[in-house]
Image: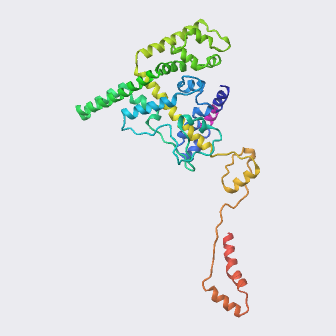
Amino acid sequence: MILYAIHRHFFVLLRQIETKNLQALRRQYLGGKDSIFLEILFNPMLLSANLDSGNFLIERYLLWNKSRDESDFPEINAAVESIFQEILPEVSFSPLYEEKESSAQLEIYDELAGLAAAKHLLGPSKDMKNIISESFSCQDHPDNFEYLFNKNQLDELVRTVKQEHGFKAGRKTRGSIKRLNKLLKKLQKFLEKEKLLVQLTASHHTHKMWSRHLAQIMDPLTLCRYLSGELPFKDFQKRLNREYSFSSAEVKSLKQAAKDVKEEVSKHSFEILIKFLSVFAQYRLHLKYYRFAHRVFNRISIQTEEENLRLSSQAGTLYQLPMAREVTDDDKRIVHHSILKADVRGSTTVTDELEKKDLNPASYFSLRFFSPINKVLSL
């Protein structure tokens, strides 16, 4: 938690510099294409060494874990992908978890252990050699679900289609909307079966309540289990760190939150599922940003040894970032070589004639031909 807080503090300062001081300079060369760069560089997953940490998940996403040690996200993701493939087969997308092909080579370097940390979520990272890329699907963008399941917008869409294209087209559109509702019902059934619907609902409320104070006295999963009704209040209080005792106001707030969770689940509202899908998509997107960033990191090394600096400089692969006081005039160095070959038409005949007259052909050509050319080249 301390390391995460320090990382976050530094990232806030770096982002201020990137978005203010450096943005104008960067856009001179990249135009408006730097937004994706900032999203990748300041991906919150880069702040944590453990992508399954409860304290990290509750601040940014949802608690996918039923226990502290193991993430249930791979199983949840596989189920969601399966439901989408069944209900919307015309929407093609590649699975998040990529199985290793027998002939595929894996990334050789993993200096910061990022690819290893995400392996159970994304699968083995294939070696991309010189060109790094990442593919995205409709399930990787949170706004898609807010738009796709917005009842008011969908009703307006049906009315517009009816007016512009007739009753038959409107009925077809309404049939497509029914498929979306069917998708949500199937997702709800899966989450209820796995006893995840209550936990995810409680996770939303845990996210709202979570604070630095609570982080010092309990694990977020403990609070989530209490709000979901899995843990009685007495047992919940026994699990607090340092034998902390809640004030009456805190007890009232906690019990009200547990009541709110129970009411939300009993309403069987699709809003819970839409919230879940939005956070689910955000998590998928950040996982891909995370893998992409670590692939880049693994292709960058910081050189400090003089010999390595010299060799890298000669090879043209050294990027120097000196401070103002360290800037000196660089020595000119040869980067490339060009060979210019010059010849004189009929030089063989001229050489023979000069030798017959006991004259030195080399001196003659040097004086009359090569010296003038060298003089011009030196200019």
Q: Quick one: which residue is furthest to the front in this view?
A: 102
Q: Position of residue 198 (x, y in %)?
A: 47, 18
Q: Position of residue 56 (x, y in %)?
A: 59, 26
In the image, which residues are magenta?
11-20
Q: Residue at x 63, y 85 (%)?
A: 347
Q: Is residue 145 left or right of residue 128?
A: left
- Give the main secondary structure of the magenta stretch: helix
In the rendered view, tell whether residue 372 sits above or below residue 113. Answer: below
Q: Let me know if residue 332 is in the magenta part.
A: no
Name the image quarter holding the C terminus. Answer: bottom right
Q: Is residue 111 left or right of residue 125?
A: right
In the rendered view, tell whether residue 23 sits above or below residue 147. Answer: below
Q: Is residue 101 left or right of residue 183?
A: right
Q: Is residue 209 left or right of residue 314?
A: left
Q: Quick one: which residue is furthest to the top in this view?
A: 248
Visible residue check, residue 329 = no
Q: Residue at x 55, y 8 (%)?
A: 252
